Amino acid sequence: MNALVITKAILEQHKLSDDEYKKILEILGREPNWTELGMFSAMWSEHCSYKSSRIHLKKLPTTGPRVVQGPGENAGAVDIGDGLCAVFKMESHNHPSFIEPYQGAATGVGGILRDIFTMGARPIALLNSLRFGGLDNANTRHLLKGVVSGIAGYGNCMGVPTVGGEIVFNDIYALNPLVNVFCLGIAKKDKIFLGKAAGVGNPVIYFGSKTGRDGIHGATMASDSFDEQAAQKRPTVQVGDPFTEKLLLEACLELMAGDCLVGIQDMGAAGLTSSACEMASREGTGVELELADVPRREPGMTPYEIMLSESQERMLMVVKAGREDEVIKICRKWDLDVAVIGRVTDTGKVVLKENGQMVAEIPAKALADDGPRYDRPSAPPAYQEMLQALNHDALPDVKDVNAALLALLDSPTIASKRWVYEQYDHMVRTNTMVRPGSDAAVVRVKGTNKALALSVDCNGRYCLLNPYEGAKIAIAECARNLACSGAQPIGVTDCLNFGNPQRPEVMWQFVLAIEGLKDACEALNVPIVSGNVSLYNETNDLSIYPTPMIGMVGLIEDADRAVTQWFKESGDVIILLGQTREDLGGTEYLKVLHHREQGSPPLLSLETEKAVQACTIRLIRDGLVQSAHDCSDGGLAVALTECCISGSAEQLGAVVQLPLDGLRRDALLFGESQSRILLSVKAELAERVLNAAWEAGVHAARIGTVGGARLVIQVDGDQRAAGCKIDLELTALYAHWGLAIPRALGQD
């Protein structure tokens, strides 16, 4: 192997610090060559090593009676009974999607699909959670169209339905959009496959697409901040081919139906480097690879390029010795490139050869597990007190409540996302029971009478104002969305999007958010079984809001009991579970009407939240509920509007009467107090539902009746303030809510 003279410039190019390079020298006992330096650079990047976050992630609850596979593998898995597992994970593709939105988003979908079917699960549903700048920005409109097209193009071609998601628009994400993708699959509990290189002498087989030069340094690019030169990083973005991925999926599932596989892993970030070293490290073995045998689509590729390429649709597997021909035959049946490229060894090292000549030799654990770990300094930013300061007395109360409601419905964050999800095939495979547009998507588990509810959620503004409370609310609201469908939450995946961890204020946000996630998950008895951390989401030293995205899965034992958010029948009674308080801090109302993002987010009582959710699930299981919808962005008035107009069939109005009870008008109508759910129930069941709620210790009030073609909300005044009245036709409400995004894109 040729030695390399390492300069400061070379280390900076590879995003390695002086101390990290010294550690490499200690591990190897010599200078690394160019290929070895590249492998360390990729595997010790923030994206692959979690070097700034790992010590904090250990605090999260990851075990439970349903957990079959927790963090550390390609995806998490939870037991759903009948010998089956729900396998799921969420991943980010933020940096690539800013540089090249279509391919960045498409390959994000491709990567998360491979994480799922690598475990032996057939993917049955996709969701996405997206963040963009304001739609008045031309580049944001370009990014939105590209990302949505990329998600649709890949998922639709794969035949996996995109059944839900959520989108927030805020200027803070203009130069750092977030593209987080979630996938759910179903596997047999006794047929879960892991990424391990077991059995000395077993062959290591490469299959899928050929290796090219696309995506080299993708992992290090995803571990860096942006500046004005971000567009020049386009060559680091991978190019996806969903038709090859579909063949790869079917080949994997056929291979997994037999007994030849020992271990399998997709080549994601860091490509062949990560799959080889991680599979060996998990098992305490080594691998020896012959790079001349790696299928490639470009001539003259160096070992450095082969090992760091992030070409898509590629997998690595270890199979039982003597079964090579059987495996190769299956791969070729599906028209995939396939080659035996190495063997499992007992050296504990990743050894690379090219035409028999050694080109790299590194301990597998040094790459996969023994990278740097940082407990970085953390401190609140100097502006935190100013952010949280909100003088309600100096804030004028709302005067024209009709205009205020229409303005909120015009906000792209609140408005219907139909323009987005209509581009997705959400019915393919015929599992989808509840399509996009309700609190949670619901998919049938074929062969059983069960269903799974899925939701993604996070309010980054809450997390900016109070990272601990904001993270708690992200868990609570995601679980509340599931409860509104009738599902019991059973597992969480997260995607933790933050700025530069070398800034103490960013680490302060991260550490507090982890504590919030931990406390909320423990209180609601829901473990985190997989996840992802995406740091360095900043451009020109401006970080995004802390956005710990949550994806959650819930189990519905009787699929026929699944509930949606829109009103069903005239004459039904509307009941509000939970109490409204003066919670205006961090609300969409404050941003849209007062152009302020300040205050303390709503305080969340986990005890109250747990009681409200349990009560809702029980009422739905007992068949007492027609519809259920949580109150979140825009508060009670927006939630009632959505109950009226979000259904795909008939729209139904409502007449509602609310007392002020000492609150401001805007807090009552548009405040975002937590742990509130709107139910509609048949009139003859209303008293039974109210009594059941009170017996469960949940505040419940009858507030109105479903019916008509208008939404009327009469607010009765008190000694402190006069009352007010919202009175709008449903057609007017829909004209704002339903068409806001197409109008902003010039497509109304």
Image: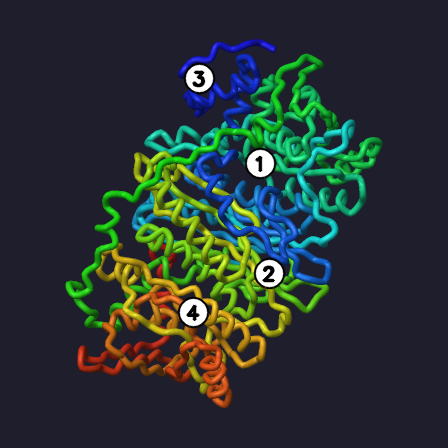
Amino acid at pointer 2: Met
Amino acid at pointer 4: Thr
Q: Earlier in the sequence, mark 3 or mark 1?
A: 3
Amino acid at pointer 1: Gly
Task: Check disc 1: other Cα within 10 Å, few if <14, some if 14-19, many if 20+.
Answer: many
Q: Earlier in the sequence, mark 2 or mark 3?
A: 3
Between 468 and 250, the one nearer to me in the picture: 468
Q: Disc 1 marks which residue?
A: 268
The answer to whether residue 552 is above or below residue 43 is below
- In the picture, the quarter occupied by the N terminus is top right
Q: Disc 3 marks which residue?
A: 10
Which tag is nearer the camera, tag 4 or tag 2? 4
Mark number for residue 427? 2
- 372 left or right of 622? left
Task: Give the CA distance from mark 4 to mark 1.
Answer: 41 Å
Task: Give the CA distance from mark 4 to mark 3.
Answer: 55 Å
Q: Position of residue 393 (x, y in %)?
A: 16, 65
